[in-house]
Image: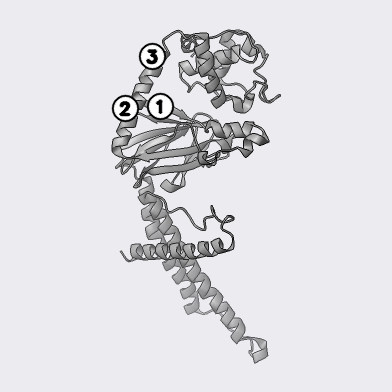
Amino acid sequence: MVITTSINFFGGFMKRITAYIGALFGMVSTNAFAEYSLNMTEGVTSVSRDIYDLHMMVFWVCVAIAVVVFAAMFYSVFTHRKSRGAKAANFHESTTVEFLWTGIPILILIAMAIPASKTLIDLENTDSAEMEIKITGHQWKWQYDYPEEGISFISNLKQSSKDVINGSDEDRNKTNQKDAYLLSVDKPLVLPVDTSIRFLVTSSDVIHDWWVPDFGVKQDANPGFINDAWAKIDEVGTYRGQCAELCGKDHGFMPIVVEVVSKADYQVWVNEQQQAAESAAASATKTWSEEELREQGESVYNTNCAGCHKKDGSGMVPVFPAIKGSEIANGPAADHMKIVLHGKGGMPAFKMLGDADLASVISYERIAFGNTGGVVQPSDVKSAR
């Protein structure tokens, strides 16, 4: 009880100090420090607040130790300086002093270890989870699966940010700041408020790291393994994070956006997504027209392929060859589907996309940019899997 009260006191005191320093910086230059933070994110979950309070307790313990040690040093130097006639003492070790400077640090470490152990146990205990979300890292996007609800989708960097990355200086100057450049996605993860959620984190290729500071969750996504974490979010809102593991060329372009909504709004969203999934399943069984394939294929291409092969299909030779005039896009459809499904060289596999999306983007590559390879249907992709 005493330890918890002390942690809360230290946390509140540090927040006031941070506010005062932030205000001082604001007096000097409001623009320069508008987005500057002097401390950890306190967060919106019990775990994130426990981590914050633990950090503040350890910080102030270190401050107190530094004050005592440096005060003793400065006092000794000032009081026993040569100009005052001080003579160097000649003494051997003191059992009492040895005991004190060994015993006191041990007691301090034990005092810090108790709340630290409690926080670590809370971080690992997912027994009370009310729902599960599977998170899979891909180069370079996130896939979210809701096992109980039967929902699955890919979350990509928002197209407005991609247009800026691949565009001209004029495009960059027109960046819409409301889109949170490089921190917005086309499909955010949607979660209900006040619900204990277990995250199952893995990867399909290389090591990624799913990190949302406001949740106090930072978990490695390792291929072939499933790591877990949990959070119970207390406040409705939009929370952002990023991949925190250097995972390849577009590591900086796979942000995380989580929309936390009320339980009622969450149920409405689930119903909408389930209906959309049924529509997508139905669309994968029909025969698409060339115009339909081109229209949807262009959208899928810009989202998943344009970063490497360019929006105009010119590619980034020699690493990422041009789609325009390529032997693959103008050759047998089976070879084209095989590469898109399973990847090749620096190109990751895209088999996580649905049959309709794959058929449309492959068809787009085969009929756009002056290519004459012809279209493929979702049934062809299903057979190629």
Distance from Cα at disc 1 to Cα at disc 3: 16 Å
Q: Is residue 100 above or below residue 303?
A: below
Where is residue 220 drawn, in percent x and y? Answer: 48, 40
Where is residue 372 drawn, in percent x and y? Answer: 63, 8
Q: Is residue 263 above or below residue 274?
A: below
Determine the residue positioned at 35% across, 64% down: 3
| Front position among marks 1 and 2 | 2
Q: Where is mark 3, residue-wise?
A: 282
Amino acid under label 3?
A: Ala
Q: Residues within 10 Å of mark 2 (few under 14, many from 20)?
A: some
Residue 284 makes an appearance in the image: yes
Q: Nearer the viewer, residue 312 or 316?
A: 312
Amino acid under label 2?
A: Asn
Where is residue 86 drawn, in percent x and y? Answer: 63, 89
Mark positioned earlier in the residue sequence (1 or 2): 1
Q: Nearer the viewer, residue 21 or 75?
A: 21
Amino acid under label 1?
A: Ser
Residue 149 makes an appearance in the image: no
Where is residue 102 drawn, in percent x and y? Answer: 48, 70
Q: Where is mark 2, residue-wise?
A: 271
Question: Which quarter of the rendering shows the N terminus?
Answer: bottom left
Q: Residues within 10 Å of mark 3 (few under 14, many from 20)?
A: few
Q: Where is mark 1, residue-wise?
A: 152
Determine the residue positioned at 36% across, 19% down: 278
Mark positioned earlier in the residue sequence (2 or 3): 2
Q: On the image, which quarter does residue 363 sit in?
A: top right
Q: Nearer the viewer, residue 168 or 263?
A: 168
| Front position among marks 1 and 3 | 3
Q: Residues within 10 Å of mark 1 (few under 14, many from 20)?
A: some
Distance from Cα at disc 1 to Cα at disc 2: 13 Å
Distance from Cα at disc 2 to Cα at disc 3: 17 Å
Along the horizontal axis of the image, is 54 left or right of 173?
Answer: left
